[in-house]
Structures are given as C-alpha cells and as structure tokens.
Image (cartoon, helix red, strand yellow):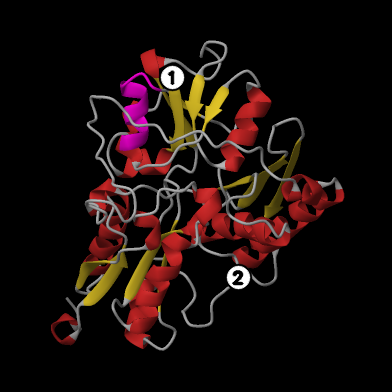
Amino acid sequence: MSGGDDRRVLRVGTRGSTLATTQAGHVRDALIAAGYPAELVIVRTKGDVVMAPVERIGVGVFTLELRAALERGDCDVAVHSYKDLPTAPDPRFAPIAVPPRVDPSDVLVARDGLTLDTLPEGARVGTSAPRRRSQLAALRPDLDLYPLRGNIDTRMGYVDSGDLDAVVLAAAGLDRTGIGERATQRFGVADMLPAPAQGALAVECRADDEEAVTALTTVDHLPSRVRVAAERRLLADLEAGCTAPVGARAELADGELTLYAVAAAHDGTTVLRAEGSTRTGEHSDGPVAAADALGRRLAADLLERGARDLMAAEPPADDRAPLVPRESTTAPPTVAEPGGPGAEPDPAAEPGPPDG
C-alpha cells in the first residue's frame, strides 16, 4: 500500500449490533482496500439498553454518544445510518462521506408469503415508525398496527412465532445482513416512501483530523451523496424530525434526478405527495447543489399544501406492552429491561434503532 507502512490504524466507531457492525465492517474494508489500515471499535449507546419506543426516546440516542466518542478521540471514524443523523451540519466534524447506497425501500416480511394486498382483514402488522404507520394506514386502514422495537431477528421472530402476521422493515438491513430473501414484498414509490436517506451510510471524522479526512474521500460515492442531499434538504426545510411522518426517495439516472416525497397524517387519513426532477449537470454549483435546490422546491410545495399541520399533530397513543415472542425459527435474543438482571445485553441483541 502506498505510504501504508507509516499510517496509523483508523479506529472505526460503531454500535455493537449485528447490523451496525456489518455496515461499519464494509467501511473498514473499503478503507483498508484504499490503503488505510482500519479496525472496528464498539461504542455502547443508551438506545442499546432502553426499550421505550423510538419516537419517545428519540433516534438521536443512537448517534449522540457515537459522535461524543468520536469527539473524545475514542475512535477516529464514526459510521451511522444516515437517516438517524440531525439535518443540521455539526462543525466538530468534517463533511460526511456517503458510501454506495443500497436499496432504500421498505419491505414487508409476512407469514405464508403474503403481501400487503393479500393480508387478511385486521391483520396484525408490526412497526413503530410514524412514517410507516401513516402510509400503511392510508393503504390498509383495517390493519392492526402494533408498536414494535428490536433488532431484525427479533422483529421477524414475531412473525415466525405467530404473534404478528407481518412486520415492515428496511430493505437495507435485510440486504446488508444477507437475508433479503425473507422479504415477501418490496414497496415501490407508489406504495410507501422510505425515510429520507434510508439505505445510506454516513461516515464522519473530526474536522481537524487531516489524515482521516483524506481517507474518507476514498469511500465517498457521489451519486449516492446527490440522492441523499435532495432527500435531506426536503426533510430540513419541512423542519421535520427523523421520526416525523415524512418519506422521500430520490433516483438518479442519466444525469436526471427525480425526487418523490410524502407527508402524511399519523392516522393516514390525509396523504400529501410531491414529485419533481432536475438535470444535475445544469446547476452552476454542481450536482449536490442541484439536489439541494430540488429538495427545497418539493418541501415548499408540501408546506404550501399544509404539511406542517399534518406533522404537528400528535400521533395516536398506543400503550400496549411490547411483545414477548414465543419460540421462533430465528431464535431472537432476549434483552433485559434497563436496570434489571443482565441489563448489559449482548451487542448483537440490540433493542433498536430504526433498521437501516
């Protein structure tokens, strides 16, 4: 490796779940392939031991402590699911690198190979994401939408055990862990839009770490960054948090960027959609600026049609106790309640967060 003998080993910080370490492992391997020695460092976050619904504790618990570890120097690089990061830039860190994005779709994992159309009336479908719940409620208002947390195996275990008829997950989480075939349906843009930046990783380092800054340029993928830029600008201009009922998906083909967006009432009774395109090569400041402008344009359209009122409404309360899956083929791990016996869970038994 060119100059590799005198390069320090870059410590890649990640949460300890199977999904998180798999994602970070891809980044580590890409850095090594580019000539930068690297290793994984596990960082435990509050979100790994608190079983409250994500919309109550906030997705920030999964990134705040990882960023704090990066700032302290406990690691040199941090890998996040991009959709979990705040939209405002953080001056402590260098501009984010975006590796090649995987499928951003949401998927259905259902018993007996069922799809959303073929699920029986009143079927129990698990998901806690307000964005997913609102779009599901619009498509199938008869469904019993059940609040859900847990790692991927735990969530699918509720289907295997018969506690639920189906769960909705991110395709990225299944694909990255090699179980994409478990999906019985992948949702297209006409059915369900994913969270902005879903399927993308955000890789960052300290702004004053010149070697790490240079290293991260080798894992950045411009087409993925352009797509994410449009989706994240839309989210920022809507002033919506990452748990708001807002979905977005950008597609880039032959220099044309198309952005699809949705803002919905929590109960699915009102769904606002927007769609727009731009030629990325025609913007004087480059493709990322073109994506940013497209995101702004669609956000303005949604706001003019009342998106802010939809997002401001309180979600319906659902205080049902978390499911305890019975014996299942995926053997989901058990996570103790915080403070109880075994409150330090196996990192692979992560209780959350959003799944990719």
* Badge 1 vs badge 2, beta-carbon distance below 8 Å: no
Determine the residue positioned at 50% across, 49% down. Answer: 54
Taking depth in this image into account, of 13 and 288 the one nearest to the observer is 13
Q: Position of residue 223 (x, y in %)?
A: 50, 57
| Residue sitting farthest toward the left | 5
Q: Position of residue 85 (x, y in %)?
A: 51, 62
Residue that mark 1 sits on: 165
Residue that mark 2 sits on: 88
Determine the residue positioned at 30% across, 62% down. Answer: 27
Distance from disc 1 to disc 2, alpha carbons, whole Å, reads 38 Å
Query: Residue flagged by tag 2: what amino acid is it?
Result: Ala
Is 2 placed above or below 157 here? below
Q: Secondary structure at mark 2?
A: loop
Q: Residues within 10 Å of mark 1 (few under 14, many from 20)?
A: many
Tell me, yes or no, whether the highlighted magenta stretch contains residue 156: yes
Give the overall secondary structure of the magenta segment. Answer: helix
| Residue 299 position by quadrant | bottom right
Determine the residue positioned at 36% across, 69% down. Answer: 78
